[in-house]
Structures are given as structure tokens and as C-alpha cells.
């Protein structure tokens, strides 16, 4: 039986996705959170929680969620998280989830455990104001029928980097997949101009690792490229984006929806 008090606008969207399990299940298994964090951007203040997709309950919270949002208790249902989202951003969040699902269907349900989605929206903080957060979601568990039943969501406060929401959904691959799909969602705010063809696929991939805090040596080992090649790519990325340093590069990358 559905609990109306904990109902939220994303439930109907997920129910339309054939890859999500519909039967409510109690999930006790802890996903490999440390590995997932390593594959995601988490520079700055962040937190994560594990989401049971069959009933929208939350577990395995990172303690940062209490401090960042000024909460006394860990939220038990996704609706409590959604209630922190700026009301003016909810229409975009709903559209972003629809867009992510459509793209994952296009790629293929058999790959859903190796894809992550990300986009930005404002959330209420402990200070009582709304700040820009970067949301990332990765699926971590399927049931015996290959239906999704669990995901990890990571929220990073990027207000100190930029206040500009790119209104872009990014679907990217988790190793071994190399997907990179950037989908712009129209909005009433004029977008920051960016020539999407400026960076090559390899440069976008390296930019993603830079955003995750990897060193040039670490990136070279992951991509099996020489450190010299990575340095050359980094110089080209800075030149093409007209960025003086990594901090300015990160700001532009968020505003352009590249990470």
C-alpha cells in the first residue's frame, strides 16, 4: 500500500521505466560505496545516501547530510530530500529524470549498472538559503529479474564554484563503459555560451577525471597514456576553455554542463 505522505513527483516517472522494480522490497545489502565515490565528482562538501527504488526509502547516509542541510535526523524517505529542493527547480528536476530515463532506454537496459546520470539544482542549506548542488546517481543493484532496486545518490555543494545552473543532463559511463551524452534542457534562463565541439571526446574524459581530483599521474595510469600526453591534453583543455587554472576550469565545466 502506497504511503501518500511520502509520495513524491519522481515516483510516477520511475514507474514508467521498465528497468525499475515495482514490487516493494526491503534492501539490507550495503553497496560498494567507496568504489562508487571514486567514480564520481565529490570535490567540496558532499554527502550520499542509498536509495531503495522500489519504495523510495533511504539508508546508509553519509553524516554530511545532517551538517549541510541542518537536519536533526537522517531522512527516511526521498520526499524529505525533494522537500529541500528549491520549488522553482522542481520542474527541471522532473524533466531531468525523464530525460535520463529516455537516454538509458536508448542505450539499453543491459547497461544500466554501468551508467550514471548527473545534473544540478538548488537545495536549502543549514544557513536557511538555497545553494547550487551537483547531483549524481548510479545504479548499484538489480533483482533476479534484472530490475533496478537500488541506487546511490551523491550531492555536492558547488555554490562556492558557481551559481550558474547549466540545465543540462549528463549520462556518462562507469568503467568499462565510455558513454558521454550531454542533453540540454530548455529553460527561461539564458545559457552560458559554449561551443560543444570545442573539446574532443578524450579531452572531456580527462576533464571528468580532473574534476574528480585525480592527478596527472593517476589519469595516465587509468587511461594507459603517458603523463606527457595527459599534460598536453590538460594544456589544450585550458586553452580551448580560456581558463587560467584548474579552479576556473571547474567553474566553466559546471556552467557548461560538462561534469
Image (cartoon, grey):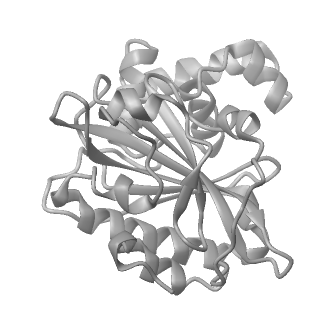
- The location of residue 113, given as percent across then percent down, is 74, 61
Q: Is residue 258 left or right of residue 213?
A: left
Q: Residue at x 44, y 60 (%)?
A: 78
Q: Residue at x 26, y 45 (%)?
A: 122
Residue at the (33%, 72%) spot, across then down: 5
Q: Is residue 135 left or right of residue 137?
A: left
Picture quadrant of residue 228: top right
Rendered position, 52 above or below 132: below
- Provide residue 83's location: percent of width, then percent of height: 28, 56
Corner quadrant of residue 206: top right
State the image coordinates of residue 66 (x, y, percent, origin top left).
Answer: 40, 32
Figure label count: 0
Q: Nearer the viewer, residue 179 or 148?
A: 148
Q: Residue at x 36, y 79 (%)?
A: 4
Q: Does any portion of residue 144 appear in the rendered image?
A: yes
**Left or right placement of residue 65 versus residue 190 in this view:** right
Amino acid at each position: 500500500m502506497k504511503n501518500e505522505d511520502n509520495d513524491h513527483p519522481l515516483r510516477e516517472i520511475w514507474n514508467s521505466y521498465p528497468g525499475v522494480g515495482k514490487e516493494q522490497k526491503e534492501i539490507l545489502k550495503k553497496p560498494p560505496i567507496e568504489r562508487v565515490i571514486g567514480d564520481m565528482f565529490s570535490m567540496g562538501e558532499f554527502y550520499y545516501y542509498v536509495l531503495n527504488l522500489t519504495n523510495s526509502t533511504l539508508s546508509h547516509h553519509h553524516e554530511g547530510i545532517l551538517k549541510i542541510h541542518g537536519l536533526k535526523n537522517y531522512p527516511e524517505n526521498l520526499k524529505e530530500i525533494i522537500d529541500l529542493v528549491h520549488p522553482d527547480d522542481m520542474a527541471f528536476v522532473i524533466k531531468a529524470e525523464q530525460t535520463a530515463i529516455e537516454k538509458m532506454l536508448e542505450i539499453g537496459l543491459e547497461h544500466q549498472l554501468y551508467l550514471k546520470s548527473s545534473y544540478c539544482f538548488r537545495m536549502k542549506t543549514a544557513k536557511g538559503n538555497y545553494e547550487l548542488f551537483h547531483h549524481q546517481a548510479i545504479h548499484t543493484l538489480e533483482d533476479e529479474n534484472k530490475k533496478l532496486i537500488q541506487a546511490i545518490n551523491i550531492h555536492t555543494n558547488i555554490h562556492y564554484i558557481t551559481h550558474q545552473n547549466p540545465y543540462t543532463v549528463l549520462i556518462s559511463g562507469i568503467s568499462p563503459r565510455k558513454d558521454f551524452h550531454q542533453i540540454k534542457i530548455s529553460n527561461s534562463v539564458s545559457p552560458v555560451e559554449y561551443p560543444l565541439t570545442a573539446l574532443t571526446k578524450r579531452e572531456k574524459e580527462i576533464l571528468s577525471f580532473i574534476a574528480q581530483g585525480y592527478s596527472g599521474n593517476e589519469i595516465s595510469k587509468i587511461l594507459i597514456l603517458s603523463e606527457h600526453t595527459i599534460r598536453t591534453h590538460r594544456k589544450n583543455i585550458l586553452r580551448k576553455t580560456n581558463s587560467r587554472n584548474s579552479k576556473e576550469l571547474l567553474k566553466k565545466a559546471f556552467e557548461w554542463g560538462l561534469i
